Amino acid sequence: MKLIFEKSRPGRRAGSLPNYDLPRAEAPEELVRRKPPRLPEISEPELVRHFTALADRNFGVDTGFYPLGSCTMKHNPRVNERVANLPGFRDLHPYQEAEAAQGALELMWRLQEILAEVCGLHAVSLQPAAGSQGELTGLMLMRAYFADRGESDQRRVVITADTAHGTNPASVAMAGFELQKAETDDRGNLDLDDLRAKVDGRTAGLMLTNPSTLGLFDEHIEEVSAIFHDAGALLYYDGANLNAVCGISRPGDMGFDIVHINLHKTFSQPHGGGGPGGGPIAVRDILEPFLPVPAIVREGEEFRLDHARPKTIGKVRGFCGPFGVFVRSYAFIRSYGPELKKMSEVAVLNANYLLARLRDVYELPFDRLCMHEFVLSARNLKREHGVTALDVAKRLMDHGFHPPTIYFPLIVPEALMIEPTETEAKETLDDFVEAMRSIAAEAASDPRALKDAPHRRPVRRLDEVKAAKRAIVKYGFDEHPGSEPERAEGEPLEAQQGA
Amino acid sequence: MAADESYPDDLRYHPEHDWARIDGDVATLGITWYAQDALGEIVHFEPPEQGSSVAPGESYGEVESVKAVSEVVAPLSGEVVEVNSKVVEEPETINDDPYGDGWLVRVRLSDPAEVNDLLDVEAYRELLAGQ
Amino acid sequence: MSYLSLTDADRDAMLGAVGVGSVDELFRDVPEGVRLGRRLDLEPALSEQELVAHLTELAERNVDTGKELSFLGAGIYDHYVPAVVDAVLLRGEFLTAYTPYQPEMSQGVLQAIFEYQTVICELTGMDVSNASGYDGTTVAADACFVAKHVTSRRTVVLCETLNPQVRQVVKTYAPGFGLEVVEVPHRDGVTDPDDLRSAAEDAACVIFQQPNFFGCLEPAPDLAAAANDAGALPVAHVDPVSLGVLEAPGAYGCALAIGEGQSAGNYQSYGGPHYGFIAARSEFIRRMPGRIVGETTDLGGERGFVLTLQTREQHIRREKATSNITTNQTLLALGGLVHLSWLGPQGLRELGETCMGLGEYAKERLGLPLVFPEPATFKEFAVRVGRSAKDVVRETRAHGVHPGYALGRDYAGLDDALLVAVTEKRSPADIDRLAEVLGQVVG
């Protein structure tokens, strides 16, 4: 399909601006733009068709089942879009006076209270923009906490699990800590002996996802917590998998001191093809003084922003965070109320049902009940038929499903990480099971069909090697000279006036 | 076109799947067939600076496929006197000809006696058999 | 609550298939000691209708820019967002998709990001853009991280005329990066190139803003040259809406261009979500943070798009990654692409000219002394109101007009200074009204 730049024709335009008939104001000559940016020149009908055609070439949860493990691709209620677009939220300037933003401040305060209750912790900052920024913020809090206690030179090491998301080690490095990896035992829990050997006075903390990226709840979480707390270290909870345990078990009760919550996973902020997200953090009381500013506080019936926090780490992004995300997640949680527990229960039931129906055709590295997701291995198909997890993923597309997460976690070869979420109907799960089973059968009977898959998408398998070798990361106007806007420099541009 | 598996007799090997061809006090370094095969099609070689020094067991550059990064480990100490510009331009040369055109750097050795610590082809093949 | 799809019969059949008698049994691996054992203490569930009523009630307690004539800016601007932006962003195929890990399922988003990257490169005069950063603050921290690795230097220089929130975020990130932050004071609203040159000795990068936080136009080419003289990477923090009339950072020697994308295609939304952009010269491509989309072909030779150069990223390089970012702001960046395509080159230029024309009109109509009379301005300018600007804001608001941002909050000695922003949504008549009300309040 053509790029928008290839549809561009000199002189065409969609947008019109008001004409105020004011004298022309100019920037000093040395600051004036000499060559106009080659933005598309396109009419509104063509613009709408272009983006509609692009939408047609994309697959969302609205299109079909999206069991992408660790991403919690649940239905995104449309009412959340309606309320986020109320003018009182959408058109509110972030520097509006507090007395004229009471509704927004109250909404954020209420969301903080809810997240504190769900996490079993004391205080919440909504500011981080996404899960990975929540991680970094949490690690900055650890730094600040130990600095405040005069232990910053000593507490240098943060431990992550070998099953961790890549963001965990990357955040550890960005926060200026040293990384140490902890091993997983043969039931998929953290290896306690390994931990005992590694945790000492140099340890600042642990970062852990529980349930883990294997979809397994750590059966020794109380012992894990004791090992770190006894050594004076802190525990950080990566909330990527919170969808499994809302109303069932709270990170604070498990012993965690800092939690980030992925609002775009558990609390249904639509993922938008890559973002936005929201990564609020909840903390135990000892860490509250270090939270980012401003804090949102309630005084009687009034809400205000509090910047006067002498021990704060500072700011991790602009203003109070991604407010529109808060509106959607708040609306989502209010539509469940205390029945949020049912959300997690059904998520776990759906996952276990899929697991029960697929375990005889794919290998199961850890034979336990799973939580909201589970990891299978296509190792058997690779060994017997040369078919890989990637081939299974691509063939699933022909059945109308988005593939699971593949090749993660790293400790499982040919991993297929499947997370159905709570919003799917049994018929959808059954259809997915049939597809996965037929692919396993096909691996034996017709492996070529898998290797060449997908067959029913707008494009066939794409050459990632070519893309990486010679990176083409923007349109080559110069190779397509016909598409350049033809306009002499300095020629005055006339606005369309009315329509 | 990917090369067939081979491990030349005249090279010395480091257990991290690197080879060295010794010519007086200069060694040519590269990665073995096994290493390039494990990575898959190589799309990038991040070379060291000419004149930088390398030490045994330490990384002096990186090779990347689409989905993996691997550090290249120096088998010997010395100073980098030449970087193979062909593999910088066309990194797939490492896959095509790992012991020939796919060499990575030339190093002037500071301690030629270190060669004795490296594996010969039999020892390296034995190591591979154990993997 | 209607977001679940299982019937009672489904649930029983599924429990049977799993081989457990109840849902509770599914949680047997959760130790007794860490179970909640009570209901969550949350308010009761609301029906959809009640939910809308509740949120409408909250929304109506906010005074948005549709209810009050507002001249607030200071980094977030009330520009017109065209209807096509809303329409495209509500398409479920974009709205409800994840990051495009599987390119055959995601050609729409991937191509859109490729087009967005192209537009950002065109605006900034750079060679490579990523798929977006969180906002205009965090991309500044990203730029410092890039500069640290490129130059191996340990200091970053921020102009005092750079948005205070951007500076605050860089200072929060810097200790983890092992970087020191140095700030360069302004002289009469803009940065002096000689001041910058001496501060930039041994610095990894210099970040200046064009137009700067006061709306003033910096001598940007001279600042970039000063940084380059000192061997520091010049980084320009720019407003996309200005780049139809103001020169592209790439054209005057910048190494990176970053900025807050909100003014192109995003609503104010009380500060987010918006998108930050970061673009660089091609030599820094392997140090770029976050997702980048690249062009390739499929098995049949057709053009297609994929996430590329992924070995930079956290899921492969882990603790050695160029950033920990994964979720970014794709949908908001898509809004930017649609808005900028709607404008086209001519519309963008007209928009910039309109903002500048309105700014000059407002300076004249307000008739208040300019805080920085010398430099030219874009879209925003600072005036003296003769007494506490905070008080003036409060009193002016009582007349239904928000006159702007009180600068004393961030700058010592500017307690009587008001930063007034005019976008294309403020007509000359609106400005007349501001002049009238401010005239009454300030006297």
Image (cartoon, rainbow, N blue to C red):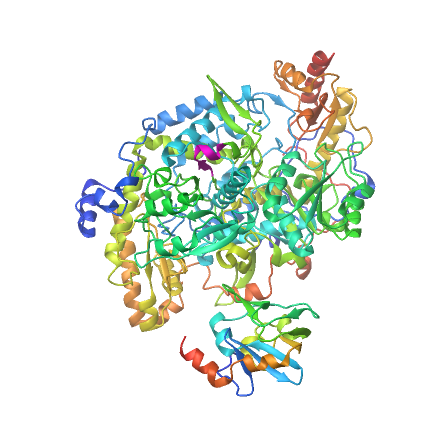
State the residue in front, A1 or A228: A228
The answer to whether B46 appears left or right of A465 in the picture is: right
For this rendering, which residue is in front, C133 or C107?
Answer: C133
* A284 within the magenta span: yes
State the image coordinates of residue C7 (x, y, percent, origin top left). 22, 41
* Residue C168 position within the rendered picture, expressed as x and y whole percent measured from the top left: 63, 37
Where A184 sits versus C389, above or below? below
> Horizontally, is C65 left or right of A61 in the view?
right
Residue A136 appears in the figure: yes
* Quadrant (top left/top right/bottom left/bottom right) for the N terminus of chain C: top left
Residue lying furthest bottom: B9
User: Can residue A239 be seen from the camera position used here?
Assistant: no
The vertical placement of C200 against C286, above or below, is: above
Give how far across and how far down residue A292 sits, in percent: 54, 34
Residue at figure coordinates x 18%, y 44% from the top left: C12
Image quarter hosting the C terminus of chain C: top right
Q: Is residue A99 left or right of residue A59?
A: right
> Is residue B50 depicted above or below C287 in this figure?
below
**Camera-nearest residue between C181 and C325:** C181
Q: Quadrant of residue B58?
A: bottom right
Residue at image x 48%, y 56%? C315
Q: Which residues are magenta?
A: A280-288
The front one of C231 and C222 is C231
Q: Residue A474 magenta-drawn?
A: no
- Position of residue A464 measured from the top left corner of the image (x, y, whole percent): 51, 64
Counting labels gives 0
Residue A106 falls left or right of residue C389:
left
